[in-house]
Image (cartoon, coloured by chain):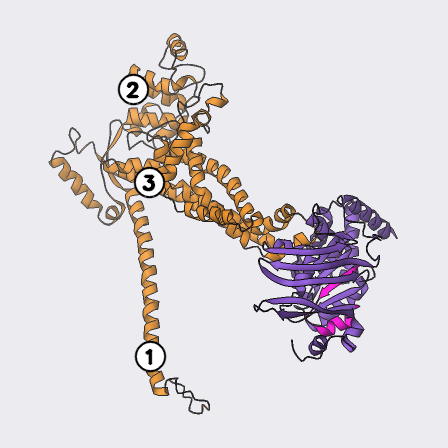
Chain colours: A orange, B purple
């Protein structure tokens, strides 16, 4: 249907005639449709990329495994006098788990475990008291002399590692596991026929479902055996990093933003500073890592190793500590925090500043009582998103020396540590499929942590913007 | 009346707060100025960077009078108004030359803190700009930051008096805890006036206070100004000549002059009692403007 304007009085020859206009209109409409479709295609590509990412991670984190337990956990539970259908191995009392270890591992291994971390506060299991006193008074006492005793999750992990000794000989991805479980059985059988699994026999092997991402995985410390490894160490390390990054980046970043927005006059120097902050936000993170290595790990070592706070005896042997890494991530985040805080402050209308100042308030009174409350939701959101971005960073942490293998939890700002992205990076570099499975499971944990932080940002924003109205 | 005693105490408390050399506002009997004038400008010129915005303004604003500044757009009347309490300082490039004497004391002299100037010479803006807080807090905040030491009930009295003086009390007395934004535009502007007078200023500057309001709200503000001039001296910038004629005692007419380089600079053309300016202006320019031949 077309609308004819035959009655038009005023005519300008530069406009197209009605017939020409119809042709033009068709061309314009086609062009509009094309660009709409192109934008939709762009969106589809983005969604597909995201979906593929999630698919890959989840596909690797769950699926069928062919597993050989050196000792059947159910049999162990039954031997201890519990009903295997009611009590699982990780719920067996602490003392009995320690007893299992005592019975199973060699005394040399046992002593080494005890020197890493004791089993009881008040008694020794593998070492004799005399030797213990001697090694603890030596020049370099092992960590077990000072660290607290192991807990249930820790000892259960040891039992898994040393007594049950599960060995995943083959694993299958989630989608084929669901669609074609027989395929996996065939694959395992063929593997045995080809003699690929060494001394194991098909009868020893059980095929079962395994969620690599599971509560035990979150609770268990790092281990060199993928079947029993967990990410507790890495999660705690990442949380410590978040805390230190926040403590550094928020006050400094918001303070700098307040100065730049509320106080700084548009001088050439201030323009230069502003430009540099914008540029710093784009500096690659590895360069911040080099900066952190040079400053926090090397120059400030007495502080970052904690030596200066403990009369010269450093809690960590060098500056490669949580606090060094947290400050490095804080520096990395700082420009983004400053920029987003500036945006939040600039969005507060000038009329409020004028209103405050015209009443005889000082700049600071106006900022404190009128500007900051209005800018708060924006400040919080920007800051949390910036920090959330930082906890996924890997490169600077590798440079400032996150330990890639460490089994003890970080206990304070001067601990050695590892972090989730480091753990994922390390595991994916191993050839065995099981490491890839736990790397995928750790990725899920990292994504959940990021989403949680983002959700906190959204909740805070909604809460405070409602209050400001 | 308990109310009055408490405000006097409050007044005294606030007056003690002032430390630097601004004269006491009550009857600043300074020798070199007429006691009837609260503000006198002497040869005041205001620059934005290199641009001369207004040149050589000498004006006297009398106590308990309403003085109006009128003129076409861009003639610098708002600039002049904002320089009377150093709000122009907020524009980084702005610079004021000449003197602005408040009870004989130059407010641009060294050692004068603009914070103190603004607390004594309050301001109401073109667009109502209440704080995004409750009506009560909007008014109490100005007293609080200026060191008000009264008890909780003193603050309540202060808020009530300010709202009564701004003819807003009856409309908002039941919703003092609601946001200032819940009010209509005219009510918001009266809230801003109440907020300004709650800090007990001496002079109130009003920058086109009715330009965002409808005629009925405008009328209420005008009535309010006539009430307020018993206690305060008011300087008002307005686009509306009828408004100037209705409320003001004296009117200053500004106009734009082009210099040889084509720069537009505002100059004071005529400053006379309002009746005289609107009935028998001395200058031809003024007559052209008020009879609507330009502007």
**Depth order, front residue of B13/A152:** B13
Residues at discs 3 and 2 both on one chain: yes
Q: Nearer the viewer, mark 3 or mark 1?
A: 1
Residue at the spot x=66%, y=47% of the render? A362
Image quarter where the C terminus of chain A lies is: bottom right
Which residue corresponds to mark 1?
A: A26
Q: Which residues are magenta?
A: B232-249
Determine if residue A254 is in view: yes
Q: Earlier in the sequence, mark 3 or mark 1?
A: 1
Q: Chain of mark 2?
A: A
Q: Residues within 10 Å of mark 3 (few under 14, many from 20)?
A: many
Co-location on one chain, circles 3 and 1: yes
Q: Residue furthest front?
A: B260
**Residue at the (31%, 28%) spot, across then down:** A160
Give how far across and how far down residue A144 sits, in percent. Answer: 40, 18
Above-or-below relation of A264 to A431:
below
**Percent x, y for residue B19?**
76, 43
Name the outermost residue toward the top. A130
Chain to which the residue tagged by mark 1 belongs: A
Residue named by callout 3 = A441
Is residue A60 positioned above or below A30 on the image?
Answer: above
Q: Secondary structure at mark 1?
A: helix
Position of A162 with respect to A142 (left or right) is left
* Residue nearest the viewer, comparing B37 with A404: B37
N-terminal label among 2 and 1: 1
Label 2, secondary structure: give it: helix
> Could you tell me which chain the residue with mark 3 belongs to?
A
Residue annotated with mark 2:
A104
């Amino acid at each position: 249907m077309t609308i004819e304007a035959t009655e038009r009085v005023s005519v300008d020859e530069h406009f197209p005639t009605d017939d020409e206009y119809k042709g033009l209109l068709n061309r314009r409409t086609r062009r509009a449709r094309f660009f709409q479709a192109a934008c939709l295609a762009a969106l589809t590509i983005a969604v597909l990329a995201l979906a593929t990412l999630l698919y890959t991670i989840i596909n690797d984190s769950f699926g069928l495994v062919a597993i050989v337990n050196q000792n059947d956990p159910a049999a162990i539970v039954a031997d201890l006098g519990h009903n295997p259908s009611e009590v699982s191995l990780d719920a067996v009392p602490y003392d009995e788990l320690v007893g299992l270890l005592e019975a199973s591992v060699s005394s040399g291994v046992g002593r080494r475990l005890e020197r890493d971390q004791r089993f009881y506060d008040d008694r020794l299991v593998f070492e004799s008291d005399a030797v213990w006193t001697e090694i603890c008074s030596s020049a370099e006492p092992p960590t077990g002399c000072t660290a607290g005793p192991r807990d249930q999750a820790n000892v259960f992990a040891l039992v898994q590692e040393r007594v049950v000794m599960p060995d995943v000989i083959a694993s299958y991805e989630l989608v084929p596991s669901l669609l074609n479980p027989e395929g996996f059985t065939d694959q395992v059988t063929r593997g045995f026929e080809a003699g690929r699994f060494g001394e194991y026999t098909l009868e020893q092997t059980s095929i079962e479902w395994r969620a690599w991402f599971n509560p035990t995985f979150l609770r268990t410390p790092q281990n060199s055996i993928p079947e029993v490894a967990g990410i507790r160490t890495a999660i705690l390390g990442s949380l410590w990093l978040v805390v230190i990054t926040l403590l550094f980046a928020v006050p400094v970043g918001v303070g700098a933003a307040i100065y730049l927005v509320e106080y700084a006059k548009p001088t050439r120097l201030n323009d230069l500073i502003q430009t540099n902050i914008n540029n710093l936000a784009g500096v690659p993170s590895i360069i911040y890592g080099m900066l952190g290595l040079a400053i926090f790990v090397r120059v400030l070592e007495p502080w970052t190793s904690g030596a200066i706070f403990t009369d010269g005896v450093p809690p960590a042997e060098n500056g490669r500590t949580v606090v060094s890494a947290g400050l490095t991530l804080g520096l990395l985040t700082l420009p983004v925090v400053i920029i987003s805080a500036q945006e939040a402050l600039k969005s507060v209308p000038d009329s409020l500043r004028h209103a405050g100042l015209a009443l005889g308030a000082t700049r600071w009174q106006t900022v404190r009582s009128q500007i900051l409350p209005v800018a708060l939701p924006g400040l919080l959101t920007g800051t949390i998103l910036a920090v959330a971005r930082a906890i996924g960073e890997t490169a600077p942490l590798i440079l400032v020396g996150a330990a890639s293998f460490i089994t003890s939890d970080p206990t304070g700002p001067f601990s050695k540590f590892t972090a989730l992205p480091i753990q994922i990076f390390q595991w994916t570099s191993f050839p065995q499929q099981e490491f890839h499975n736990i790397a995928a499971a750790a990725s899920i944990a990292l994504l959940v942590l990021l989403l949680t932080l983002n959700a906190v940002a959204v909740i805070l924003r909604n809460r405070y913007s409602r209050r400001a109205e | 009346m308990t109310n009055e005693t408490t405000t006097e105490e409050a007044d005294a408390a606030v007056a003690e707060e002032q430390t630097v050399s601004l004269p006491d506002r009550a009857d600043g009997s300074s020798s070199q100025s007429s006691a009837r004038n609260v503000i006198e400008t002497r040869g005041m010129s205001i620059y934005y960077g290199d641009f001369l915005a207004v040149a050589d303004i000498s004006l006297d604003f009398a106590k308990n009078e309403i003085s109006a500044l009128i003129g076409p757009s861009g003639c610098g009347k708002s600039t002049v108004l904002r320089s009377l309490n150093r709000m122009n300082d907020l524009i980084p490039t702005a610079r004021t030359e000449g003197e602005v004497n408040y009870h004989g004391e130059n407010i641009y002299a060294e050692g004068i803190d603009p914070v103190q100037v603004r607390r004594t010479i309050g301001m109401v803006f073109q667009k109502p700009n209440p704080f995004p807080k409750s009506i009560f807090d909007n008014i109490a905040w100005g007293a609080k930051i200026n060191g008000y030491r009264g008890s909780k009930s003193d603050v309540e009295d202060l808020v009530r008096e300010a709202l009564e003086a701004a003819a807003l009390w009856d409309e908002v007395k039941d919703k003092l805890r609601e946001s200032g934004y819940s009010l209509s535009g005219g009510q918001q502007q009266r809230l801003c006036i109440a907020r300004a007078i709650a800090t007990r200023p001496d002079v109130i500057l009003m920058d086109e206070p009715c330009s965002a309001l409808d005629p009925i709200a405008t009328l209420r503000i005008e009535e309010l100004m006539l009430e307020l001039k018993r206690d305060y001296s008011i300087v008002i910038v307005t686009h509306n000549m009828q408004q100037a004629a209705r409320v003001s005692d004296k009117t200053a007419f500004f106009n734009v002059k082009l210099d040889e380089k084509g720069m537009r600079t505002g100059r004071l053309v005529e400053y006379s009692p309002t009746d005289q300016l609107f009935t028998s202006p001395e200058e031809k320019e003024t007559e052209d403007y008020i009879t609507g031949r330009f502007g």
